[in-house]
Image: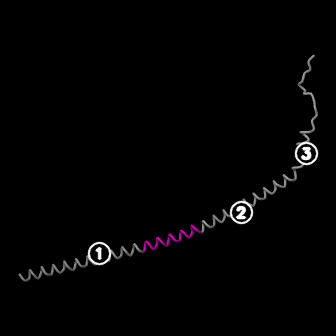
Amino acid sequence: MTSQSQGIQQLLQAEKRAKDKLEEAKKRKGKRLKQAKEEAIAEIDHYRLQREKEFRNKQTNVMGSQGNLSAKIEEQTTETIRNLTSSYHKNMESTMKKLLSMICDINPEVHPNFRQAV
C-alpha cells in the first residue's frame, strides 16, 4: 500500500509541476502578447508620424505652388486691367468724336426705295 500511496504522491506532484509549468507558460504568453501589442502600437505611431510628415511636406509644396499661381494670376489680372485702362484713355476721345459726328452730322437723303406718286 505504501508503494501505491508513494506512486499517487509522485503523480500528484508531477501533475502539480505540470500545472505550474502550464500557468507559467500562459503568463509568458500573455506578457509576450502584451509586449508585441505595445511594439505594434509604437511601430504604427512611428509610421503614422512619418506619413503625416510626408503629407505636410507635399501639402506645403502644393499649397506653395498654389500660392505662386495665385500671385501670378493676380499679377496678370492687374496688368490686363492696366492695359485696358490705358487703351480706354487713349481711344476715348477719338471714339467720342466718331459717335458725335455720326449723330450730329445728318445728310438728309431720300431713301432708294421711295417711289414718287405719278
Residue at image location 90% in from the left, 43% down from the top: 98
What segment carries the magenta color?
39-56
Secondary element under disc 2, as helix, strand or loop, is helix
Q: Amino acid at mark 1?
A: Lys
The residue where tag 3 is placed is 97
Q: Position of residue 51 (x, y in %)?
A: 53, 68
Are the residues flagged by discs 1 and 2 in contact, CB closer than 8 Å?
no
Comparing 85 with 5, the one in front is: 85
Q: Secondary structure at mark 1?
A: helix
Count residues near mark 1 (Cα–Cα under 10 Å), then give few for <14, some for 14-19, many for 20+.
few
Residue depicted at 43% across the width and 72% down the height = 41
- Residue neighbourhood size for the residue with mark 3, other residues' Cα within 10 Å, grouped as few (<14), some (14–19), many (≥20): few
Horizontal side of residue 112 vs 6, given as left or right: right
Contact between labelled residues 1 and 3, with CB atoms less than 8 Å apart = no
Residue at the spot 92% in from the left edge and 20% down from the top edge: 116
Q: Which residue is mark 2?
A: 71
